[in-house]
Image (cartoon, rainbow, N blue to C red):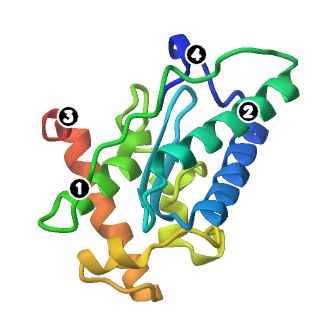
Amino acid sequence: CRGNRWMAIFRNDRDCEMFLETLGEAVGRCGWRVHAYVLMGNHYHILLETPEPNLVAGMRWLQGTYTQRFNARHGECGHLFQGRSKALPVGREGGYFSAVAEYIHLNPARVRGFDFAGKKLEDHVWSSYPGYVWKRKRAEWLCVDEVLSRAQLSDMDFGRRGYRKKMELRMKDLAESDEPWK
């Protein structure tokens, strides 16, 4: 989902923290399973599973509640998001689920100005990726097992190192050519 008129929906770290706190509340209210997320200034991506048919109601609550909190914090009023959230169904068959998780985790590296030589993906703390490679940085509601198991890895030190290596190779591909990620 994007900010209204492509404007920032996260102005600073406190906004990002507030969004993740609100997302955690939505997970508790709706029973969602969040597999990946990234917050990117004027938009965010979430790969989530809805065991109950409550995506629309849950997203309405998530975005409405965050908008109210954002507006109260910044002394503003009105719309924050550009329309409804966009949802694409992702089946468990084939490799699309893994591709979506990788797309989300690589999103910070896809922005212009990313210094491939000087930065690591885990430097972008407003992503689920650091929780994949550093268990201690993981939100309690983040579900990593599905993505790791699809990469034939586990949520153990060795498996987390394997996921980091896989994503570093993907970043190398991205640095050499953006074409495969369009």
2 and 3 marks in contact (CB < 8 Å): no
4 and 1 marks in contact (CB < 8 Å): no
Task: Report which residue position mark 1 lands on.
Answer: 99
Q: Position of residue 129 (x, y in %)?
A: 48, 60
- Measured Cα–Cα span from mark 1 to mark 3: 15 Å
- N-terminal label among 3 and 4: 4
User: Judging from the image, what secondary structure is the residue with disc 2 in?
Assistant: loop
Picture disc at residue 7: 4
Q: Residue 116, can we see it?
A: no
**Is 86 on the left-hand or right-hand side of 40?**
left
- N-terminal label among 1 and 3: 1
Q: Which residue is the extreme one toward the top?
A: 5
- N-terminal label among 2 and 3: 2
Q: Is residue 94 above or below residue 61?
A: below
Q: What amino acid type should be assigned to the residue bearing mark 3?
A: Asp
Q: Quadrant of the C terminus?
A: top left
Picture disc at residue 73: none
- Measured Cα–Cα span from mark 3 to mark 4: 25 Å
Crowd tier of the residue under label 4, counting other residues whose Cα lies within 10 Å: few below 14, some 14–19, many 20 or above? some
Give the residue displayed 64% in from the left and 55% down from the top.
26
Give the residue displayed 19% in from the left and 48% down from the top.
173
Task: Report which residue position mark 2 lands on.
Answer: 12
Toward which corner of the image does residue 28 lie, by quadrant? bottom right
Q: Nearer the viewer, residue 176 or 179?
A: 179
